[in-house]
Amino acid sequence: MLKGVINGVTIYDRPKKGKKDDTYHVANKRGAYDGMVYGLKYQCVEFARRYYIQKFHVTFPEVDNAYDLFNLKHATDLRTKKKIRFHAIPNSMDVWPQRGDMIIWKSEGQYHPTGHVAIMKEVVNRSIVTIVEQNGKTKNGQRNIQIHHPGILGWIRLSDNQQDR
């Protein structure tokens, strides 16, 4: 079910309880990435990968859990096939995520055992940011969070001004 759209990338909602759909989400439009596997439908990592493919033309290696994204060292530019460095930025009061960064949650509380990932949309004020996510408790795929919450590991950012394209 469609939940929302951000920067042209669709956000989906899981089927209602009792309806399991563990299929993979595959690009089905004609174009450069037709047939590319994004990941397990409705999951947060699938959305993050699909967002990075559609928005920045890069993809990243598969991970077992969302929190494993924080340890990724690189992404791959789909047009040039070159490696692009990921920078892991630990959650700190001194540093803020930028638009397009992947915000990574620890494997604890409601995000146990897999962690969680969302895309940074904008800074609201000195402690709140708006994120975009799939598989979260939102009406339209967006919500405001306290960014310097201890449950957040940090965020990862592409180098080489990849996000400015």
Image (cartoon, rainbow, N blue to C red):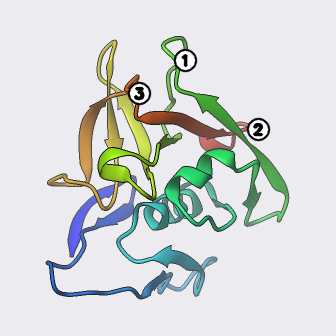
The tag on residue 95 is 1
Nearer mark to the viewer, of 3 and 2: 3
In the rendered structure, are the residues bearing label 3 and label 2 in contact, judged by CB atoms less than 8 Å apart?
no
* Quadrant including the N terminus: bottom left
Three-letter residue code for mark 2: Asp
Say if residue 147 shows up in the picture: yes
| Image position, residue 62 (x, y; %) | 64, 68
Nearer mark to the viewer, of 3 and 1: 3
Three-letter residue code for mark 3: Pro
Q: Quadrant of residue 155?
A: top right
Judge by depth and name the residue closer to the eye, 104 or 160.
Answer: 104
Q: Residue at x 76, y 51 (%)?
A: 74
In this figure, which residue is indicated by the disc labeled 2?
Answer: 160
Left or right of 16: which side holds 28?
A: right
Nearer mark to the viewer, of 1 and 2: 1
Query: Between disc 3 and disc 1, whose residue precedes?
Result: 1
Vertical side of 14 occupied by 149: above or below:
above
Query: Between disc 1 and disc 2, whose residue precedes?
Result: 1
In this figure, which residue is indicated by the disc labeled 3?
Answer: 150
Report helix, strand or loop for mark 3.
Answer: loop
Report helix, strand or loop for mark 1.
Answer: loop
